[in-house]
Amino acid sequence: MDSATRQHGFAQALLHPGALVPPGLTGARGTADAARFAVYRNNVHVGLTRALAQRFIVTERLVGAEFFAGMARAYVGGCKPASPLLMHYGDDFPDFIADFAPAATLPYLADVARLEAAWTRAYHAADAAPLALARLAGLAPEEMAGLTLRAHPSATLLHSAHPVGAIWAAHQGATVTPVESWNAETVLVVRPDMAVSVHVLPPGDGPFAARLLAGHALGEAAEAALAVDPGFDFGTALVGLLTLSAFSDMQQGDVP
């Protein structure tokens, strides 16, 4: 058995509770020791569960440590790390939460987890200078319509039927503050400098921001937003997104 096959067998046995001790793995007496291997396997599962708790802090606070641990164990049992970098583990944990029946009474929980996953991705994203508003100042109106803006590498836009930004913000201190208004929110998560920021966008700016961050031209994004809200203020929304450092570059035509 070559080294790669042996390593694969070890990893499979380590990550699946029902698997047998891998062939050739023995204890001090020269025989397979299922009990000792089970302890090692349990330590791996505990480590993955703790990694999720460290990444989804608010999610855990919302349901309590005991419930979260059970939910995380269920996730770990079926979802193994795809990368040796634990900072990526749990990217699909929010989707798991959305389908986790015991959490069905908290319909906002999965979106809060999505916000926290976006926060981690932003923290580890590539550095890039934000697009300055001054670069657009000298453009003629006909140039603006076909302009596309490149999303900042750290930027994620999340729309939720629940006030996920307000819920997240309410749990940042030792004392939980009440959420004053239970409305849908569109949240921008971005890290233009050293610190990750979470911004709740004005209610009418969501469709516009979503299209711009997806690579659509300014004119098309503005038309889509106006179709939803005839009172939409294109200029104010654009300046707001640039001020929040949502973009890193611009060009005429589609963003590749």
Image (cartoon, helix red, strand yellow):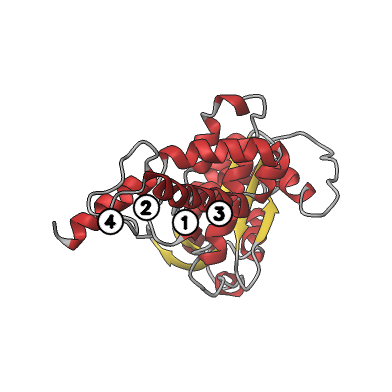
Q: Residue furthest left?
A: 1
Q: Which amino acid, by three-letter code, is at mark 2? A: Ala
Is residue 81 shown to the viewer in this render?
A: yes
Mark 4 / mark 1, whichever is N-terminal: 4
Residue sitting at 66 percent across and 24 percent down?
105
Inspect this view and state whether residue 231 appears. Answer: no
Dot 3 or dot 2, earlier in sequence: 3
Q: Amino acid at mark 1?
A: His
Spatial CA distance of label 1 from label 3 is: 10 Å
- Residues packed near mark 2 inside 10 Å, few (<14), some (14 to 19) or many (20 plus): few
**Sooner in the amino-acid sequence: mark 1 or mark 3:** 3
Residue 155 vertical placement versus 94 (above, below): below
Cα distance between the residues tagged 4 and 2: 32 Å
Label 4 and label 1: CA atoms lie apart by 37 Å
Amino acid at dot 4: Gly
The one nearer the camera, 8 or 239, is 8
Camera-nearest label, 3 or 2: 3
Q: Which residue is mark 4?
A: 30
Of the numbered discs 3 and 4, the one sitting upstream in the chain is 4
CB atoms at circles 3 and 4 under 8 Å apart? Answer: no
